[in-house]
Image (spheres, rainbow, N blue to C red):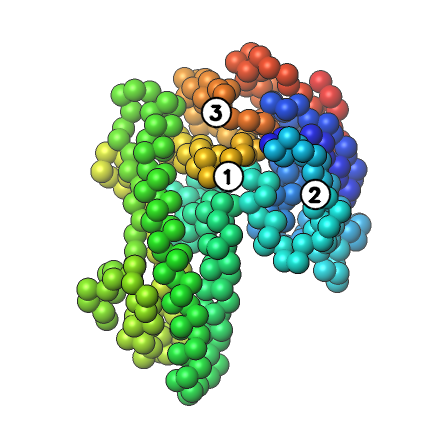
Amino acid sequence: MTLDEISLTNFKNIGSAHLAFSPKLNCFLGNNGMGKSNMVDAIHYLSFCRSFSGAPDRLLVRRGDNFAMLKGRYTRKGAPEEVAIGFAEGRRKSVKRSGKDYTRITEHIGSFPCVLISPADMDLVNGSGEDRRRFVDMAISQSDQRYLASLVRYNNALQQRNRLLRDNLTADRNLFAALEMSMDVAATYITGARRAFVDRLRDIHRRYYSAIAGPDAEATDITYHDAALANPEVQGLDTTAPGWLQKLLDANRARDIVMRHTTAGPHRDDILFALNDLPLRRTGSQGQQKTFTIALRLAQYDFLSAVSGLKPLLLLDDIFDKLDADRVESIIRVVGGDTFGQIFITDTNRRHLDDIVSHIPSQHSLWHVTNGDFSPL
C-alpha cells in the first residue's frame, strides 16, 4: 500500500498543500515548528481519523479559518482508493472512502494501516499504564474490528457505571448488573487479544532491538500485567472464563461506591518492559529506552503487515535525537530493507536525511518546510 498524493486545506499551520509522494522514501527537512510534523500528522489522521497528539479537531483547524479538509489518494492492493476527511466546528466530521460515507467512523480504522515513531513514544516507558494500553489498543484495532467494537462497548459501559457510582449511589442493583454484563462480554475478548498480541510481539521486538543495538545487546522482555489477578477481593480468578469481570465488579462494588469509580477491569491493566530482567523505566539509559521504543514500533509494523496483508505506511518523526551514530545507521539499514514499504521521515538535520537516501537508493522525494510551505529539494 502506498499514499500517492495528499491535499490539505487549513490543517494546523498548513494553509494549502498538494504533494505527490515517492512509493518508497519521502523526507521533510526544516527547523522546529515549521510544519514537518504537521504533514506527518495529516497522514496519520487519514488512517485514524484523529491527530496523533490527541488534540480535538477544533484545534487542528488553521488559526483564522473555520474548517479543515484532508484528501489522500492511495494505491491499495493494486487498486486506486481515495480518503477524504473534513471537519468544522459545530458540524459532524465527514469521512469518505472513494466517495462513500462510512456508517460508523470506526469502520475506517485498519483499512489504511500506518505506524508512527516519534519522540512522544518515550511516554511508553516513562508514562502511565494508560499510554501503554493505548499503544496496544491502537495496534490491535487496526487489525481486528471485533476488538475495536469490544473496546468501544467496554468503555461506554465503564463510563455509565462510573456515572452511577458518582451521581446515584442508591441506584438499582439491576442497573449495575446490566452494565457489568456488557463490560464482562467485552472484557474477556479484550484481555485475550491483548495477551496474544504481547506474546506475538515479544520475539519480534527482541529481533529488532538486537538489530539496532548490536548482537551483544541487552535481553529484552515484554509482559502483559493483568491487574485483576492481583485483586485481593477475589482469589483464583480465571480471566479467560466468561463471567470473571462480573464476579470481580460485584466483589468490588462497595469499594467502588466509596471511591466513586470502577477500580478493577481491563482499563487497569499494564504492559511491563524489561532489560536483562530489570525494569526498563528504572535501569535503562535514554539511548536504551529510545532503542526499545523504536524496536517496539517496528515490531508493531511486522505484526500489522502479517495480519493485514498490507505494508503499512511507516512515519518517522524526528527520531534520531539521543541516539549514537551506530544506532542511527542501524535504524536506517533496517528500515531500508524489503520488509518495509513506503516511508515518511522528518528531521532538522540534512546530514541524517542524506545518509538515509544513500542507504535507500530507490526513488525518493525531499522537501524543505518553511511556515507550512513545502518546497521540493
Residue 350: name its quadrant.
Answer: top right
Q: Label 3 sits on what residue type?
A: Thr
Element type at marker 1? Answer: helix
Residue occupying image coordinates x 73% and y 21%: 376
Q: At label 2, which amino acid type do we have?
A: Val
Of labels 3 and 1, earlier in sequence is: 1
Asked which quadrant contains residue 124, the reply is top left
User: Which residue is found at the position 80% from the left and 50% from the top?
Assistant: 65
- Res 14 visible: no
Query: In front here: 4 or 133?
Result: 4
The label on residue 308 is: 1
Evaluate whether residue 114 shows in this view: yes
Q: Amino acid at mark 1?
A: Ser
Expressed as whole percent of the image width and height from the top left, the position of residue 20 reads: 73, 27
Locate the C terminus and report the quarter of the image it occupies.
top right
Residue 188 in the figure: left or right of residue 110: left
Looking at the rendered structure, the secondary structure element under dot 3 is loop
Q: Nearer the viewer, residue 366 or 301?
A: 301
**What residue is pinned by disc 2?**
83
Viewer-nearest of labels 1 and 2? 1
Image side of residue 72 versus residue 133, left or right: right
Q: Are marks 3 and 2 in contact (CB under 8 Å)?
A: no
Q: Which badge, 3 or 2, comes first in the chain's sequence?
A: 2
Locate residue 366, reporting x and y percent.
Answer: 67, 21
The span from disc 1 to disc 2 (Cα, nearest Å) is 18 Å
Q: Which mark is residue 339?
A: 3
